[in-house]
Amino acid sequence: MKTARCGSAITVSVGGCPGLPACLGMIVFAIGSTQIYPVVANDQVASVPSFRNDVIPILTKASCNSGACHAKAGNGQNGFRLSLLGFEPQEDFEHIVKEGHGRRIFFAAPDQSLLLLKATNTVPHGGGKRMEVDSASYTTLKRWIESGAASNLASDPQLTAMDVQPSHGILQVGSQQQLTVTAKYSNGTQRDVTHFSLYEPNDKAMATASDEGIVSIHDVPGNVAVMVRYQGLVSVFSVSVPLGAPVDKLPAEKNFIDQLVFANLRRIGVPPSDLCDDSTFLRRVTLDIGGRLPTVEETSDFLHSGDPKKREQLVESLLSGPDYADYFANKWAALLKNRRDETSDITANFAFHSWLRDGMLANKPYDQMVREILAATGTIVANPPVAWYKRVKEPQQQIEDIAQLFLGVRMQCAQCHHHPFERWSQTDYYSLTAFFSQVGRKPTSTRGEDVIFHKRGLAQTENKKTRQPVRPAALGSPAPDISADEDPRLRLADWMSDKSNPFFAKALVNRYWKHFFRRGLVEPEDDMRDSNPPTNPELLDALAKHFVTSNFDLKDLVRTITLSTTYQLSSAPNDYNVVDRQNYSHYYPKHLTAEVFLDSIDQFTGARTEFPGLPVGTRAVSLPDNSYNNSTKFLKVFGRPEGASVCECERVQSSSLAQSLFLMNSAEIKAKLATGEGRADRLSKSNSADAENIRELYLAAYSREPKIDELQLAEAYVKKLRLDAQGAPLEEQQSKRLAYEDLIWALMNTKEFLFNH
């Protein structure tokens, strides 16, 4: 018996054939950090390398067929084109062997083949050296050329499954784990493909993975997943990284959210922060539900109330008020592309926004809202959801937007090739597209607007690559029989809202979870796939189940989240959870959105922003479309979306130099501070003591009383004598007004004001 190391595995052979896992009679053991996982090797010697099963994996591992290299859209790289990740092996064979006058393959002297000379950088290569001359990959490619560079695609066994061991694990900070990847083929053989697989952690701050499948754990506790890809298949290694701190004192659990969050914190040994105080909760939940700051009166009443149910009552009050409807209609209007590109769009913009707002106010079930959008017919005036079809006209764009927005599935890649990180194929893409193949349009008297109707006929579309007709079919479901008289969009809506749908409810609850916690259980929130698992799968499942059981009640979902202890934890970390960014052991502060920030400044200063064509006093969160971004520079600087994408990422919620300069120097901010009858002007004329006025400022900005040192510092600043340009003392009221303007400006430039915490 002999042993040898092959890639990341230890091979043990009988009969003197060490080295390759394909050798006859070989037993392969992959050595992990805690266990040994046996792998059954091929039962026949692979005398001639397979193009599909040997050559393509080498090119993929070397990134030759990545989107940044020779699989780049168009003509590839420098005239050499490959299919993305080898999903089209027949095309790749043609490009490698038959194109370029055959110069990429040199049968008489395989070592002189351009394929090898470029890969080893013997001949200058823009992609640099991708393999060594004496490597196993180089040897396999050379053997393939020596054997005649045959394709054998028809006779090659098909890859049917892959297995990653271990699939789950608990690893300590600083430890490593060797993964073993086994490919299974249609002829019953198996192969260790650890060395030829690709590894991608979903959080590089928590873990990294080497090319050989060695996962290294860093010093951030929590749950991390490593995506493992081999040819067209994807699997995941999920690992928990415990901190190991004692979790013996936990706040009281309010609902199932707390049970599942705290269970995970116990498992990884991360103690949660304490509950936030009443001031923090009031400001936090009013911003998150109503998109505004609490008023001074609301703050005083709440802080002085002794009712043990006051937090529950506050949430109910916010949900029943118009601010909730304004704020969430604003959110959905941007995601649904309620965009004004021309003046004639104004009717559609206002109608669609009003329809969204009315639905939020009436608490229309979410599945009904989606159904009314998908199956909208008629004119915009008679049926406002038709406005969605004004912006999203092509079936391909319609299904891409719907899949990403309502299912959390990004289908764009599958239009041209198999999705690189998912199981969705071109057939899946065009099967979804076919649901919109019978949408008819007729022009109306309003420029750019159509009557939307169902065209009678067989619902199907053409696969742009195969040129074959494709019937409507939902993801993972067989194609239903749809008559020529039936609108196929109704079938799609039925499937989406079915209680067993694995995507619909999860996509929504994950999106709302991110709204309230800054980070989704799956991140990005609209990229939910097997290779991007949630940080707390049990919680995501429970939230989705609760949402379905409530008959898709959006207000109930908001109520359930905001009344949980998890939502009410302090944002101040303790000694143990300061590095936690995904387990919700404390509240994660988040920037105020552009609209909320502008409204908060107006409310704090006592100013009003005037928007063209809208009544005085209209809030920024009530704006129906993107056109006001151009008339109000503040909204553009602070990242209000234009409604060009269904991705939440279009909204900017990070700081920038432009924002800082705007707050410091813009004439708009200065005008708000100095506005007549504004807060600074009113306080300077007030007969109240300076301490009482300063107290009002802190209640208005932070929903809390000033601390003793803050009060003393502010009082001294207000009492300070101010001089005019000639050095003469200003009159008392004018001096105080300038002082209060400065105080307001200083308070609204603090992180405590800029963030919801």
Image (cartoon, grey):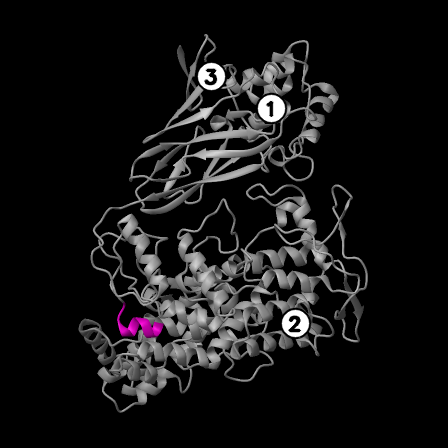
Whether the residues at callouts 3 and 1 have beta carbons within 8 Å, the answer is no
| Residue labelled with disc 2 | 385
Question: In this figure, which residue is indicated by the disc labeled 1?
Answer: 55
Residue under the point 54% across and 28% down: 62
| Res 542 quadrant in image | bottom left
**The C terminus - image quarter:** bottom left
Q: Toward the viewer: 64 or 260?
A: 260
Give percent across and percent down for residue 132: 50, 18
- Looking at marks 2 and 3 on the same chain, the residue that comes earlier in the sequence is marked by 3
* Closer-to-camera residue (172/540): 540
Q: Is residue 409 above or below residue 131?
A: below
In the shown orientation, is residue 174 left or right of residue 336? left
Instruction: Give the CA distance from mark 1 to mark 2.
Output: 51 Å
Callout 3 environment at 10 Å: few (<14), some (14 to 19), or many (20+)?
many
Q: Earlier in the sequence, mark 3 or mark 1?
A: 3
Give the residue at x 58% y 33%: 160
Rounded to the nearest angstrom, the CA distance separating label 2 from label 3 is: 64 Å
Label 3: which secondary element: loop
Q: Is residue 77 above or below residue 251?
A: above
Left or right: 594 in relation to 396 = left
- Decide whether the magenta segment is chiefly helix, strand or loop: helix
Residue position for label 3: 26
- Above or below, comparing residue 152 to residue 345 in the picture: above
Q: Amino acid at mark 3?
A: Met
What percent of the width, then of the height, locates residue 362?
A: 53, 79
Q: Position of residue 216 (x, y in %)?
A: 36, 35
Point 67% across, 43% down: residue: 416
Q: Which residues are magenta?
A: 276-283
Q: Are marks 2 and 3 in contact (CB under 8 Å)?
A: no
Q: Is residue 133 left or right of residue 381?
A: left
